[in-house]
Amino acid sequence: MARVRNSIWRGLAAAAVAAALLAPGAGHAQGSGKTLSFIPEADLRSLDPIWTTAYITRNYGYMVYDTLFALDENFKVQPQMVDTWKISDDKLTYTFTLRDGLKWHDGKPVRSADCIASLDRWMKRDVLGQSIPPVLGEMKAIDDKTFQIVLKKPFPLLLEAIGKLSSNVPFMMPEAVAKTDANTQIKESIGSGPFKFVASEWKPGAKAVFVKNPDYVPRKEPPSWAAGGKVVKVDRVEWDYIPDPQTAANALGQGEVDWWQQLPQDLVPLLAANKEVTVTSVDPLGSIGVLRFNHEQPPFNNPKMRQAVELVIDQKEMMTALAGDPKYWRTCYSYFSCGTPMASDAANAPLAGKRDFEKAKALIKEAGYNGEKIVVMTATDQPIVNAQALVTMETLKKLGINAELAAMDWGTLITRRASHEPVDKGGWNIFFTWFVAPDMANPALNAALRGNGAKAWFGWPNDPKIEELRDQWFAAPDLAAQKKVAEQIQAEAFESVPYVPTGMFVIPTAFRKNLKGVIVAPVVFLWNVEKG
Amino acid sequence: MGVVAIFVFSLLYLAPGDPAAVIAGDLATADDIARIHHQLGLDEPFLVRFGTWAWSVVHGDLGISIFTNLPVTKLIAQRLEPTAALTVSTLILSVLLAVPMGVIASWRVGTWVDRAVMGFAVLGFSVPPFVLAYVLILVFAVYFDWFPVQGYASIADGLVPFLRHLVLPSTALGLIYAALIARITRTSMLEVLSQDYIRTAHAKGLASREVLVSHALKNAAVPIATIVGIGVALLIGGVIVTETVFAIPGIGRLTVDAILRRDYPIIQGVVLLFSAAYVIVNLLVDLSYTLLDPRVRY
């Protein structure tokens, strides 16, 4: 009898365990209060958005820090931490007054000295910020809430620079933190932004946690890109980095996470078929593909060879391979991001016109190319890079170029691209990458367009004319003048071909239908998002 | 361990890739990369770098992660629980499943039961853990919604969530391990079952269960324990894949991320940890021989 009773108890216990383990949906995290579970584009590795240009750290920066000015959806710079500002008639003195109620996450007030130290550190690192020190007289605090930037000569782009949207964004930090050497990574996470970072819960490579900053005073204006009111409508945000796309898709489909920032094209149909999920694009601009030549090594040290490739690269083919559905890509025959003020059709016939293999072959002949091997580098762990490389290989073969595809991972590629050696000594001829549109929106930001030789970005184009025009662009007094110079730069670029733009694409995003208030912007912002 | 340390350090030194280039980001110039390279001490000669690292290691310091600026020991400690939980649960599941299967197969050798067990073993060896993982997720997490698709719940969050998150990964990872143990158990048991004393036991009229468990399995246990120890290496390899598929924040994922970014201190630290774990497990297995077979004590 005792054995029977024991058996019954054992059976009941087993059934209870099984019931608890198998309870449908018991593993879903999204029901837990107002927690937004978000799969970011990459894992957060560095907490210093001034030290690195990594977009994931920039996005972290927008959560934790605030900016003096910010760009809105009309490409206008709007005040953010700044309440009022004044520019002297001679355009040399900028006076800024901070808003009331700005506090660091440790409770201390935001002071002018903090902002000056933050700007100073940013100017040492950022590509646009580095243009300011040569014209900078001084930065001085008038009082705790007011400070001045005094210039030696006018710099019309000053507010645009301070309100820069993408890396490196001039985030404001406490003076003690901002005094850290610009080349040394900060360890603290004390901002004045709408979220506080929970350092104790940070698991690099897996999870980053933010909680609502109760002391944050949002602006009254509606949100518009990085500008306007940053009203946080959830208590907590968890960045759950899921490296495997299929797992991420399943997690979103089952409601274990709320939002997947970037999903690969091949999983779009799967999630689009889920009635609980919205698949869309929240990036109004997108990103731009880049085919980069090595200008130091033959045969692409000869402009005719670069022109030949430019004449046959078909953006439609590139983008179809890269992004598939035309809903997620567009052609952009400009050296400046289409949809931004500097973009134009000026002199773009070599890229926008008919793909002319005959003319390209004639240019190759003129260049004296004799079938030497060229190395095209691709990163097989980066689908965006790999798709561009594979299409280009086919195109180069059609041109009669002896191209060899060197497949590697991205970590190896970015090391090898720094090599100035010829291909037989580990060098390279072509590689691919992409930039978000705000990073290619004008001559100041577009690093791949520089023509300053050995100091230029990898590939090292040497084009003094572009550099001269770039200086003119900085000095241009207004938008019309800037556009005119930008057109001249573009005309020169289509002639010297520092790189070939391969088209614009957006990476789809997907979120649960109960999310409201997702901001459409080139950078992912998590304020204003509401969980129904 | 010293040999492993020298080997892994040399291998990473010779491997292509530069963490400075990864850190600097896509917009960096060659000057930026050179500066970071210098800051990280990557331009020092091999012997200087190795000496510095080895000196720190013997003092219990595995270094600082190049990317996160956090101590490697802290990063490993953060990830230890999920990996330990996954490994132990897989081990338990595999042994509980595989040993009885192997015993039954040997007992019913040549019958359909034996063939079914051997079929399971072949399947276990043939199906990669990540394929099985996706199938299990599809069936038990997506269709039936019985288990979570991904993630890990600490035992501190409660026993039920902890177990719920471990069932699918342990099953996916355990299949290959169970296949290995089942095969070895069967082989070992067959050898023992052909011994005279087993025939004697049967002749004495002992029940089959008694003969199998008390007489045969006990004597067949040493090779089984050996394969359990050796199989830990297999398990470590599988953990890396399984943690990636199930998004478990364990040491396997830490390793993959570190390799992709060339975060040398983490890779070196994790390899040392894995090799230490392997040595300890095999030591425990050796010690277990004395319990399983009293003759080993003499």
Image (cartoon, coloured by chain):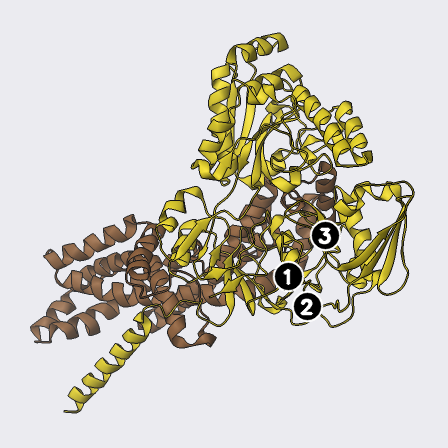
Percent x, y of residue B17: 60, 40
Chain with yellow colouring = A
Whether residue A380 is visible to the viewer of this picture, yes or no, is no
**Residues packed near mark 1 inside 10 Å, few (<14), some (14 to 19) or many (20 plus):** many
The chain identifier of the residue carrying mark 2 reads A
Horizontal side, residue A119 vs residue A26: left or right: right
Does residue A375 lie above or below B201 as drawn?
Answer: above
The residue under label 1 is A230
Amino acid at the residue labelled 1: Lys
The residue under label 3 is A78
Horizontal side, residue A50 vs residue B12: left or right: right
Classify residue A171 by image quadrant.
bottom right
Residue at x 55%, y 27% (from the top left corner): A376
Sequence-first disc among 3 and 1: 3
Amino acid at the residue labelled 3: Gln
Q: CA distance from mark 2 to mark 1?
A: 9 Å
Nearer the observer: mark 2 or 3; the answer is 3
- Residues under numbered marks 2 and 1 in contact, where contact means CB atoms less than 8 Å apart: yes
The chain identifier of the residue carrying mark 1 reads A
Q: Which mark is residue A216?
A: 2
The chain identifier of the residue carrying mark 3 reads A
Percent x, y of residue A129: 78, 45
Q: Colour of chain B?
A: brown
**Residues packed near mark 3 inside 10 Å, few (<14), some (14 to 19) or many (20 plus):** some
